Each structure stands twice: as structure tokens, then as C-alpha cells.
Image (spheres, rainbow, N blue to C red):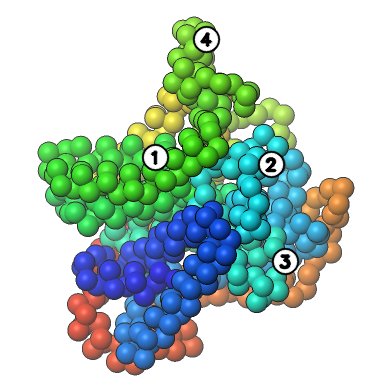
Amino acid sequence: MLGLPLAWLIIQSQKLNPAYTLILAIGISALAGYLSFWAYFLTPVFGILFSTGLIVLAIGYAIFLYRKRALTGLLASKDVYFPLLLMLAVGLGYLAVLYGINTGDQPDQLAQLRFFDGTFPPDNVLPKILADRLYNGEDPRPLLGDWQSSDRPPLQAGIFLLQRPTAELTNLRGGLHYQIIGTIAQCSWVAAVWALCRTIKLAARPIAIIMAFCIFSGFFFFHSLFVWPKLLAAALVVFACAVLLTAVYEDRPPTTIEAGLAAGVTALGMLAHGGVVFTVPAIALMLVRPKTFPGIRQIIVGFAVLLVFLAPWSAYQKLYEPPANHLVKWHLAGVIDAADKRSSWEAIVDAYRNAGVAQILHNKRTNVTELVGNPPDQSNTNYGRRSREYFYVFRGLGILNVGWLVYLWLLLKRPAAFKDFTHRIGTILGVILVSLLFWIGVMFGPAATTIHLGSYATMILLFASLAALVTPLPRLLIYALLAFQIVRFIIDWVVLTAVSSDTILMVVPNTWLFGLAILSTVATTYLLYGLSHESQLHPAFLPIKTNLDSYLHQHHAQDDSEQGSTIEKPE
């Protein structure tokens, strides 16, 4: 993790929430990847020197901090080691399931063959194609068929390029190396959910339950493996939401560092995938209150950071490979033809003028109903359930929709023990509602609000908040709901998934990877169990633990009891 030592120093010096350490480190690494993209764009030689030098510098800096014993508190802090170990266990488990059967000749395209019928577009490999072109000194224009290199933001391509020199050392095939790097990047959602839960000030057991519901869900599982960078983008934007939620919960404007940090990770999220744009306005709107509205300085800093990050890519799109508005016109104006020469605004105005009021109302109505989805042509087979989980928002949430009933009960009964909890979750649900309404309104339609066309940041917020709302229920009921989801997940996404294509017949399990999947599941369960019981992990997980208490006290690290509030149901 290139950015971890630097993130720790920033957290300590700026007195930010220690729960932000890992996701901030991911943001710093993402920024390094973005810079790497531009280095390779100039020339492959400069790119290789840049990425290799940065990796060596990061390793050297980490060794320096280790010798100074400055890494002791970093690696022993629960806000670092728990999400980091969980992210590792989850990523390994997901990959072991993916490659638990014959990988075929295209390991980076296995996800769509493994779980669906192989007819998916190549969205997951577009960043790899762009990275390969730049690494080999080739012109990336056009990228693949009608796809331009400017159609999709470059962050994941840059992250892959940053690690690309290590592929020669590991002797991994390019596709496999890319899949591993891509899955690590998508599993950033673990760190983002951790930061969000700690911002809400949840206790240990509810966080463990929330993580379990997320880990054993088709949404996070599939999109951690089908590595278009939507989960990476979502994780960064959810981090921005968590930073600004701190100010909202404390009824104050965000500080300058909070404004700059939120703007920076939001920009990086948009540079990973533009779909998060449907959530960003909703996050910004929660600050539009007298007590939380940012000052002039914070607004200027926020916009300046956004401009610095986004302007180079905008110039690439407009000057190097224009027009790069194909997807905008497709989703917001219904114009599929990539050869259309109109500007985005002209296409949108023409589309609404030509549609008429009746058609527009029909489109928006179907955008609403598509959130639930009830296609009559999909049977109740495991494949049909996977498809519905992939396409439709509320079906993707599955058993967690129980959380809506719990929230209604909290609003009606207003139990005093849950007053603060209801307020905090209600703020997030408000962001989600505004995000969904904005998405429904701007998508031209009809029925254009399927999950893969929206913001995965909204989905992460939905999963985390609804899972949090389940935690006040009686424990036996919680575990029954979780067990139901896990069983359904294993049946639909792990056991009954093998499909065939012209080039691959996936029927033979890999014994070693099957064992790794079990081991990773055991490790994940152990981590969640340890957190839920607020017990220390086995010392084998923490080789650097000397003088922890004195170190944390010296650096003013916050104790768990200060970070978490008890939302447990009173006995």
C-alpha cells in the first residue's frame, strides 16, 4: 500500500478521524496512479522510471519509518489493521472463487463468463487495453471498436501502469496481473464502508454485521471481480461523503482540510468512473444549511482542487481525442449513434423536444419502476436471481430491504435510545433519496435506471445504511436474516454458476483455489467475530505491537470507545 505511511502522517498532523487512514491511503495511491498515467502518456520510458522510482521511494520510506518505530502505532491501530486485513481476506476469497475453475485463455474476462452468459461488453478490460497501448508506446486512438480512449476516465489504467513493471518480476500473465490489481482496487469499498460506519459512530458489533451483509452479497462480489472501476470510484466518493458527514453531524461548516480532501477524492472518483456524478450533487446538498454551509475559503479550495484534478483529463478529451460525449448523449438524451456530431446540450434539448410530454412522463415513470424491476421473462432459477440482483436496485439489496421497515418503526415510535442513531442514518438516507431522484430525472429513459447505469456510491450508501438499520433488531433475528443471505449467496454466486462458451468449458474445480476460498472465508469470519466481540486479534496478525499503548497515547490516537457509540438494543 503505497500511500499508507503518508496517510497516517496526514491523519496525525491534521487530527482527522483515524478511521480514514486506509481509505485515504487508497486515495493517495490512486493519485499516484493518475500521475503515472500522464507519465506513460508522455513516453513509456519516463513512465517506467516514474512508477519504478515511486515504488522504490515508498518502500524506502516505509523502511525508514519502521526503523524509527513510527509504524508501530500505524499497523497496530484497529482503524488500520482491521479493514486492511478484511480487505485482503475478502479480495483473496473473491479471486479464489473466480479462478476456482478453469481460467481459460483470458483470465481478465472470466467474470462475465463465470457468472453470466459472456455477452457483457468489455468494460472491465478497457482500462487494461489503454494501459497496454501506453506501456508499449502505441497510439490509443481508437481504443476498441467504437470505444475511444477518452470515453472512460483513466484512473484504473494509471493504477495498472503504476504496478506494471512488477508484472515482469512476478511472471504473471498480463490479464491475470490486471485482474488481481483491479480486484484490489475495487475492494476499496471495504475501507470506505469502515470509514462510513466509524463516522456514524457505530459500535463494533453493528460494524461487523454490516460488513458481513456486504461481503456476502452478489453486488459487492460480482463488481469486485468484474473490474470496471465503478466500485473504486464509489469508494472514493463515499469517503468524501464520510468526511463531510462529520461536519454535518457536528453542525458546523467543513474545515479547509476537509473541503480540500473531500474535493480531491471526489475528483479521483470521477476520474475512475463518471457514474458517481449522480451521487455527488446529493452529497453537496447536505451542506446547504445555515450551520454547515462552507465559507468562501472552503468553497474556493474545493473548486480549485476539482479544477486541478479534472482539467488535464478534460483537455485530453477535448484536444487529444474529441468529442468524448458519446456516453453522456446516450444516457441523458437517448442518442446511441457514436457518430452524432451535436453537443451534449443540443442532443438533450432535441431529445426532449422531439419526445413530447406524454413520452417524457412515460420515460420517467418507467425509470421509477425499473428500480424494483419485475421482468416476466426471468424464471426463479439461480441465473435469473443473479440477473435481477445485477440489474435492479431494490432486488440487489435483497433481505436488507427489511431495514426500511425498521427505519419506519424508529420514526413512528421514536425510542429515546435510538434518537441519535436515527438522525445519523436519516441524513444518509436523505443523500440516497436525492441521489435516486436526480438519477431518475436526468436519465432520458425509458427504464434507464438499472444498477450498472447508475452510481455505485449510492449503492454502497444503501447497503451500509440498511444493514445498519437491521442491527437494532434482536440478535437471533439478525443472524437468521444474515444466514438466509449467505445461503442464497453461496447457492447463486458460488455453487451454481458454471457456464460454457466457445473457448472455455468451466467444469473442473481447482483444489488449491477451492482450499484458498475456504481459508479466506474462515479468516473473514474470524475477523468479523473478533470485531463483534471487541476482542484482540491473534498476535500472529500483529507482528509489530511493542509499546502500543504508550505510542498511541503519545500520538493522541482515539480509543475505540471514543469512536463508537452504543446503538445496541437495550437488554
CA–CA distance in space, label 4 to label 2:
32 Å
CA–CA distance in space, label 1 to label 2:
29 Å
Residue bearing mark 4: 355
Query: Which is nearer the eye, 86 or 20?
Result: 20
As drawn, 400 above or below 107: above
Mark toward the viewer: 2 or 3: 2
Q: Callout 2: helix, strand or loop? A: loop
Residue bearing mark 3: 173
Query: Which is nearer the eye, 59 or 488?
Result: 59
Q: What's the mark number on residue 144?
A: 2
**Amino acid at circle 2:** Leu
Mark toward the viewer: 4 or 2: 2
Going by the image, does 199 lie left or right of 441? left
From the top left corner, tell me how far across and down residue 50 is, in percent: 49, 67
Residue bearing mark 1: 279
Q: Are marks 4 and 2 in contact (CB under 8 Å)?
A: no
Mark toward the viewer: 3 or 4: 3
